[in-house]
Amino acid sequence: MPIEPLRGDIRADPALDHQLRAVLARLSEGAELPRELPGIAALARRLVEGAPASEIDRQIRDLSHAGYVRGALVSLAAHLRLRPRPDLVLVLARELCDALAPDLGVELARAALALPEVEDSRWQPTGAYAAANLLLGDTLLDRGDPLGALRHFEALLAVDIDHARALRGWSTAQRRLGRGGAHASRGLALLEGLDATELVAGLGVDRYELGRPLGRGRHAVVYQAFDRRVGRDVAIKRLVAEGSDGRLVSARFFAEARTLARVRSPHVVALLDVQPAHRFVALSLCRGGNLRVAVRKRLLGPADLPRVGAQIVSALRAVHAAGAVHRDIKPANILVREAREGSPVALADFGLALADPRSGSGHAGTLRYLAPELRSPGPAARATPASDLFSAGVVLLELALHPQPLPAVFDQIGAAAFDPEEHVPKDLPDGWTDRLVRMLGPDLAARAG
């Protein structure tokens, strides 16, 4: 819902600042910086210019759909520490509650609700007070806390007894309390509370001892775990999507596992176990983070281009030999085996992969790594091994140019006309200048050369 702006800035508030610092601490690692991505830079510029919340919300959602949600939210949180605005605080809280970090979103919304300026908007039907209470009510209901949700719905009904959304939420919370707290998850709230629940309940399989969470997405949580049977650490990727979309998401989840099972390469994350009844798969564990994180930690740099490039190309050859196309090659999906210099990399996350390139649209993946032939709409656009190689070329160019950002042309939707010789450095070692020019060129057959 649109939030009516408040007059003036929020006074410095320790509780709010504490929550904003917590957001930065949680999300900064691996987040794209304004100097690295024009879209993030544009967002930062509009924040400084005082753009309306509706425009900022739209920019963040566009960046989220393109795969840059962390960078967008980090830029917003950093700006809010300097120039807090209640409408933008709630934009940030809503995005956090939508799966990325619901615990932080709840605490941030609570901090906003405690501000005198937000309390003063109590009688505005679309004000910050109403928006904060609705966000907290809906989120707590999804988190399995109907009693906590009830308090926020009742706060809103005390102001507007006929508020339709608050009435629906209040009724749902009452029903769930009447059933002893049973609730139905919509599959998007991947919660801190889930971590504790899963760690206590386990996986339903005695073989694995569940450890700390490593990451989360909209439909799955990844944990470090110990395989008691063979005595090694593994990564457990557990599906948590339920509700109306649960069956479709589950089918895609295990289709990803079947695709991965056909691939044989030391530079592809290995599938170790599949447990459909318990909704998880076990994968080889990579301890060094993803490629972007490793570069920022100086575990990798431009000098590693020949080694990393050869390993990524080798991984893609194995994927393509298995008859699949990955469709989402980007730094976040290339993991580093160990947290040390010289560690090999491994291709991961086959959630968008096509087991048969002849089926399905090519319109998937992240814009800046998308091949030019896939950027134009139309049924003729199909993902192929050549489009994977183009994406890998962009990743390697990004590594070669570090700490300089990628050319802006990669972030343009209609960037079909692109001259790689204009942007690829001329002095890359071991023939990688020519190799990258071919990978980023328009000749699909030459990309594999």
Image (cartoon, rainbow, N blue to C red):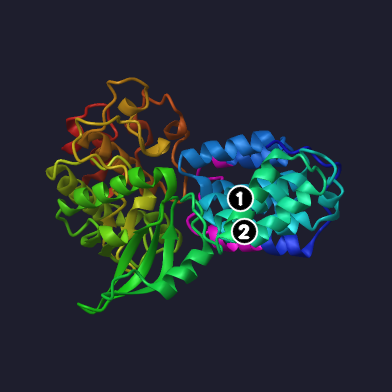
Name the spot of residue 339 as percent of width and height, x first.
Answer: 36, 69
Q: Which residues are magenta?
A: 20-40
Mark number for residue 146?
2
Of residue 54 and residue 187, the one placed in the foreground of this image is 187
Name the spot of residue 109 as percent of width and height, x first.
Answer: 69, 55
Q: Quadrant of residue 165?
A: top right
Q: Is residue 37 magenta?
A: yes
Question: In the shown orientation, is residue 380 left or right of residue 109?
Answer: left
- Kind of residue indicated by mark 2: Pro
- The vertical placement of 9 against 190, above or below, is above
User: Does the CB distance between marks 2 and 1 fall below 8 Å?
Assistant: yes
- The vertical placement of 266 against 209, above or below, is above
Q: Earlier in the sequence, mark 2 or mark 1?
A: 2
Of residue 424 and residue 161, the one placed in the foreground of this image is 161
Residue at the image point whose x is 22% and y is 33% from the top: 384
Under circle 1, the secondary element is: helix
Q: Is residue 351 magenta?
A: no
On the image, numbered disc 1 is attached to which residue?
A: 172
Of residue 37 and residue 223, the one placed in the foreground of this image is 223
Query: Could one spot residue 294 in this view of the protein?
Result: yes
